[in-house]
Image (spheres, rainbow, N blue to C red):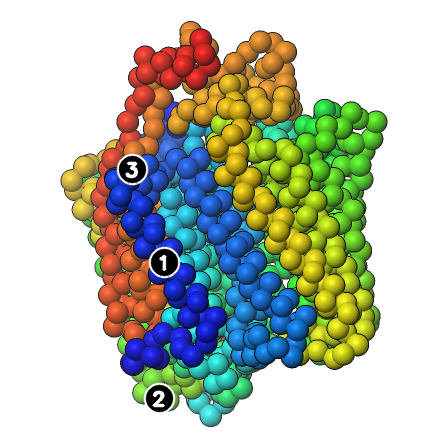
């Protein structure tokens, strides 16, 4: 627990606490990869077990999932811009891009909720078959992650407004940016292996 | 809900349990009030973020859990020695073997080892605390409340009864309605969060906070075993998290993962469970290997033989441990090809394990062994564990496993590895590091009594089980055939022998607290590694200063060069984290949410979850970054501790 602070390099890496938190978060993301892999594996094993419920090809639509993908991918890009602004030392730029990122994330969530309700109306719910259980839990776990990420980012924006850019706040923002990109990567896998495959099989 | 649905009724043994819970709780409350110790308890323990104190709380809780699991075990043994006495009925027997297994693995073995890691690993690498002391406290409280939640099930709501493996469809909502199985799911989930966080915490600590100059291959072997274990935890525990969550959603929200309806797939559970479960058995054995390595090197007074081979074999074991899970259900229809592949991978694990055994033997070879209690536990481990390992390889032969599977042969196998491995290591480690933790040794004479009772009791209890298993006695039965009687009676006698050993062990803690000579120096056993360089009691900041480390057995060379961890010239203010009540409050609220979910009170559970999120928000806004210990104070503390 050293108190030494480096004078150069990105703000978030200047203290040992900062470096350790970021490493710890990378390792946490490793654990998250295992968590989602397990859910993907479950989904793959239960694929096609729809019982009396509709099959995915009847429900999955390219339009809405493409829009969702577009929203989330863009939000990952704007999140990168936010970090770029942070590195350049612009608090205002950082907050602006973060807010835009969150807006896109909220849009994604809105579509996801709409989609789930729509499926439920068509007779595909968590309870209807093991395939649909796996689908809702996999996509839902991703959705819950996005929701938590939004709530967390809001707290960080308040802290940024109150405290400005310090080694601590920039570390926190950097960590959440890692989280956000990670969710984007997971979504790409969901989009391809769940939606695209589900549409054609 | 009626009160008599909430509390378990109609079973005299359980009424006894209730009464003793009430009595013990009131006694504790009374004592704390009478001695005016509430403030002390809160300030010194419940809000601490000091790794040494958290470690002690882990170990105390683990000992309590060992007692609970041990009582379960003795009740099962009594039932099997006198099957006609109707001591336990079938339902009660099912509940007890379930809680016994779960408590022992999740709430005894792991926390005991994590407790030792907590105390020792930062000291061995010359660190002042964990990388994330706050998270460490959160981990402890999540384990603690998880354990409480699980343990309370036998008086409130009813215990789970589907075995520690909780196989579906039996454990699903259709065949096991009611809160019992939910206690299992929520208790493990709650404790699992803490375990994962500890894994990450230890990994960052070891990677980032080593003393200046200490390279990876200079680290003490126990630290290495901890690092490898953290790796397994990080990659195995999320699988358990998912498995538990899916079964919870099945049971409470009606999904169809493991059900017999809706094209669910009960075998999925077995796969997910053992993809975590087999790595889990290595999570509890690798640290044990580390502990024995330290003790054997210390009391053989030699450098550990084949240090690098030891490290690489652990890494190999960790990798292989993810590739063998199917050996737990060879008989469940995987087919010849799959069984063969997993049979081979299973037997492969015996190779690095064998390497370790030979390294220990080579360390002992031609050495002057000091027969301390800790060393005796370690020496007894080697042959006992070999029996467990060899029978494991027998089980690994898929074709033969059709005979052994789910018989007492299997029971004997895993008790030989888990008791002779993990439990012996916990005892050995506690005895060995006790002077570092409490400032006095455990009495050696009483310690040896407890050792012999436990060791002989262990073999008398479990060796016969190999044979009664080969005779066809299945596991998890409460009534037995007459021809199995004699060996079962012998087993029960042995079990009580182990019980006596445990009681003597605990008595020794009391006796030594009263009568043992207090340690004056920190180096109780003429040790080799850095933890022995600190004075006793260890100052809360651990190390005032550290010399540049080069090479293994750092403290040995420090002693040679007359160096200490107190170099007055180089003193600097030390930065320390502040105590905080947030971890215990946060986890108490989460425990409340879990309890509500056990009874499927969704509204209350949601409130609890929101409360937990609010606590996390509060934490996010908390910018308390600790305080500094000034040079003068360090001088004062070190001088008085070192008698200068
Ligand atoms: C040489 C190393 C080992 C081999 C080859 C091995 C092999 C096996 C096999 C094949 C089984 C399944 C048998 C059956 O269900 O029919 C098994 C069960 C088990 N083993 Fe091992 N094992 C080894 C080491 C260990 C260690 C080190 C531990 C723990 C510290 C352990 C703990 C267990 C447990 C807990 C079970 C049974 C769980 C249950 O069904 O309730 N094993 N072992
Ligand atoms: Cu196994």
Query: Residue at horizontal 56%, vertical 30%?
Result: B441
Instruction: Give the alpha-carbon distance from disc 1 to disc 2, as whole Å.
Output: 57 Å
Circle 1 residues within 10 Å: few <14, some 14–19, many ≥20: few
* Mark 1 to mark 3 CA distance (whole Å): 23 Å
Q: What element does badge 1 sit on? A: helix
Q: Is residue A199 visible?
A: no
Name the outermost residue toward the top: B569
Residue at point 79%, 26% (across, down) = B367
Q: Is there any visible trace of residue B36 in the rendered image?
A: yes
- Within the image, what quadrant is residue B169 found in? bottom right
Disc 3 crowd, CA 10 A, few/some/many (<14, 14-19, 20+): few
Mark 2, ligand 1, within 8 Å: the answer is: no
Task: Read off the chain for label 3.
Answer: B
Q: Is residue B139 left or right of A99 when viewed as pictured?
A: right
Report whether B482 appears left or right of B138.
right
**Mark drawn on residue B40:** 3
Residue highlighted by disc 1: B23
When the figure is inspected, residue B414 is found, relative to residue A138, above or below; the finding is above
Write the residue at 51% across / 18% down. B520
The outermost residue toward the left is: A162
Do the residues at pointers 1 and 2 share their chain?
no
- Residue carrying label 2: A122
């Amino acid at each position: 627990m050293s108190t030494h602070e480096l004078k150069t390099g990105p703000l978030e890496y200047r203290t040992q606490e900062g470096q350790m938190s970021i490493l710890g978060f990378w390792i946490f993301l490793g654990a998250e990869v295992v968590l989602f892999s397990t859910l993907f594996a479950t989904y793959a094993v239960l694929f096609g077990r729809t019982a009396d419920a509709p099959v995915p090809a009847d429900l999955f639509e390219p339009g809405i999932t493409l829009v969702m993908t577009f929203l989330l991918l863009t939000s990952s890009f704007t999140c990168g811009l936010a970090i770029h602004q942070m590195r350049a030392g612009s608090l205002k730029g950082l907050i602006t891009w973060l807010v835009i990122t969150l807006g896109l994330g909220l849009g994604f969530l809105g579509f996801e909720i709409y989609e789930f309700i729509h499926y439920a109306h068509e007779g595909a719910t968590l309870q209807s078959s093991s395939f649909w259980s796996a689908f809702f839990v996999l996509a839902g776990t991703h959705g819950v992650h996005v929701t938590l990420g939004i709530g967390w980012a809001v707290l960080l924006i308040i802290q940024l407004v109150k405290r400005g850019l310090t080694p601590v706040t920039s570390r926190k923002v950097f960590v959440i940016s890692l989280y956000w990109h990670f969710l984007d990567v997971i979504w790409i896998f969901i989009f391809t292996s769940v939606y695209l495959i589900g549409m054609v099989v | 809900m009626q009160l008599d649905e909430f509390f378990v009724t109609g079973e005299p043994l359980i009424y006894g349990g209730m009464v003793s819970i009430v009595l013990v709780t009131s006694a504790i409350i009374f004592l704390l009030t009478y001695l005016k110790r509430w403030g002390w308890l809160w300030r010194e323990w419940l809000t601490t973020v000091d790794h040494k104190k958290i470690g002690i709380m882990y170990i105390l809780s683990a000992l309590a859990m060992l007692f609970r699991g041990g009582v379960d075990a003795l009740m099962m043994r009594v039932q099997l020695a006198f099957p006609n006495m109707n001591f336990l009925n079938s339902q009660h027997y099912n509940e007890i073997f379930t809680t016994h297994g779960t408590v022992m693995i999740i709430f005894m073995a792991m926390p005991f080892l994590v407790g030792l890691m907590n105390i020792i690993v930062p000291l061995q690498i010359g660190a002042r605390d964990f990388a994330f002391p706050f998270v460490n406290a959160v981990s402890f409280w999540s384990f603690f409340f998880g354990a409480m939640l699980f343990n309370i099930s036998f008086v409130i709501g009813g215990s789970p009864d589907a075995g520690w493996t909780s196989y579906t469809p039996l454990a699903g909502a259709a065949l096991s309605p009611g809160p019992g199985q939910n206690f299992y799911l929520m208790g493990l989930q709650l404790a699992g969060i803490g375990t994962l966080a500890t894994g990450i915490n230890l990994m960052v600590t070891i990677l980032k906070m080593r003393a200046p100059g200490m390279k990876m291959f200079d680290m003490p072997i126990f630290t290495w075993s901890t690092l490898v274990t953290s790796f397994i935890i990080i990659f195995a525990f999320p699988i358990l998290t998912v498995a538990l969550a899916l079964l919870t959603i099945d049971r409470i929200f009606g999904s169809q993962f493991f059900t017999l309806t809706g094209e669910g797939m009960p075998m999925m559970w077995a796969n997910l469970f053992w993809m975590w479960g087999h790595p889990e058995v290595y999570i509890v054995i690798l640290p044990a290997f580390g502990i024995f390595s330290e003790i054997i090197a210390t009391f053989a007074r030699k450098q550990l033989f084949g240090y690098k081979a030891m490290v690489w074999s652990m890494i190999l074991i960790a990798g292989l441990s993810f590739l063998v899970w199917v050996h737990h259900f060879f008989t469940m229809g995987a087919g010849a090809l799959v069984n063969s592949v997993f049979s081979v991978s299973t037997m492969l694990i015996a190779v690095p394990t064998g390497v370790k055994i030979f390294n220990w033997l080579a360390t002992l070879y031609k050495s002057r062994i000091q027969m301390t209690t800790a060393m005796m536990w370690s020496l007894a481990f080697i042959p006992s564990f070999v029996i467990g390992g060899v029978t494991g390889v027998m089980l690994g032969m898929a074709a033969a496993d059709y005979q052994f599977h789910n018989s007492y042969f299997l029971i004997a196998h895993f008790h030989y590895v888990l008791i002779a491995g993990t439990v012996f290591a916990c005892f050995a480690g506690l005895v060995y590091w006790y002077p570092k933790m409490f400032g006095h040794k455990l009495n050696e004479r009483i310690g040896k009594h407890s050792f012999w009772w436990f060791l002989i009791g262990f073999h008398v209890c479990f060796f016969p089980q190999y044979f009664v298993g080969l005779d066809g006695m299945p596991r998890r039965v409460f009534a037995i055939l007459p021809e199995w009687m004699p060996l079962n009676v012998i087993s029960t006698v042995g079990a009580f022998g182990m019980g006596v050993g445990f009681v003597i062990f605990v008595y020794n803690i009391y006796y030594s607290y009263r009568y043992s000579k207090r340690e004056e120096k920190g180096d109780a056993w003429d040790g080799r590694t850095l933890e022995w360089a600190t004075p006793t009691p260890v100052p809360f900041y651990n190390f005032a200063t550290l010399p540049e480390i080069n090479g293994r057995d750092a403290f040995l060379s420090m002693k040679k060069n007359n160096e200490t961890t107190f170099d007055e010239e180089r003193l600097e203010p030390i930065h320390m984290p502040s105590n905080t009540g947030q971890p215990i409050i946060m986890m108490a609220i989460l425990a409340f949410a879990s309890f509500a979910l056990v009874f499927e009170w969704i509204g209350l559970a949601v409130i609890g979850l929101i409360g937990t999120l609010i606590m996390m928000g509060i934490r996010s806004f908390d910018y308390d970054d600790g305080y500094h210990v000034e040079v003068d104070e360090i001088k004062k503390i070190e001088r008085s501790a070192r008698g200068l």
